[in-house]
Amino acid sequence: MTMSAQNEKLPAQQLSGVAGVLAYAPSPIFALMALATAYGTNATMLCSANPGLLPIDGMTMMYLLMSLFHLPPWLKLVSPYRTH
């Protein structure tokens, strides 16, 4: 392999490393956003006569679903059947 071919692969390898690390970011962030949305002071819950048993509204449910959707990188990390 020539020197120019190695230089061309280097940015792609660096991008792959950065993308690999960033794959772990969304799931915990969405989970924290769901907690903040569920237990934050919501004007509709303060004014409601019967807010319900669980503090899960539409936005909280969306953040929980997004957190679950972005969970596969974490599952691959802890899986005993990993292939690298």
Image (cartoon, rainbow, N blue to C red):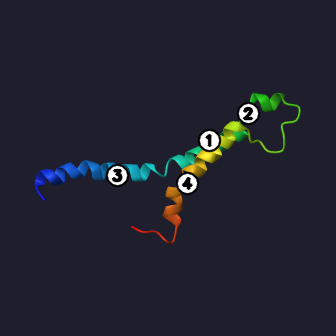
Measure the C-alpha gap from mark 4 to mark 2: 28 Å
Q: Is residue 21 left or right of residue 33?
A: left
Give the distance between the C-alpha atoms of the residues marked 3 and 1, in whole angstroms: 27 Å
Q: CA distance from mark 4 to mark 3?
A: 19 Å
Identity, as a three-letter code, of the amino acid under mark 4? Leu
**Relative height, residue 76 to residue 63 (above, below):** below
Instruction: Relative to 49, say whether 76 is above or below.
Output: below
Q: Which residue is mark 3?
A: 16
At label 1, the amino acid type is Met
Q: For residue 66, what is the image quadrant?
A: top right
Please state the horizontal and vertical placement of residue 61, each as a whole percent of the image. 68, 43
The residue to which callout 2 is attached is 41
Q: Is residue 78 left or right of residue 40?
A: left
Pointer 4: what residue? 71
The image shows residue 42 at horizontal and vertical percentages of 74, 31
Q: Residues within 10 Å of mark 3 (few under 14, many from 20)?
A: few
Helix, strand or loop status at disc 3: helix
* Earlier-in-chain disc, 4 versus 2: 2
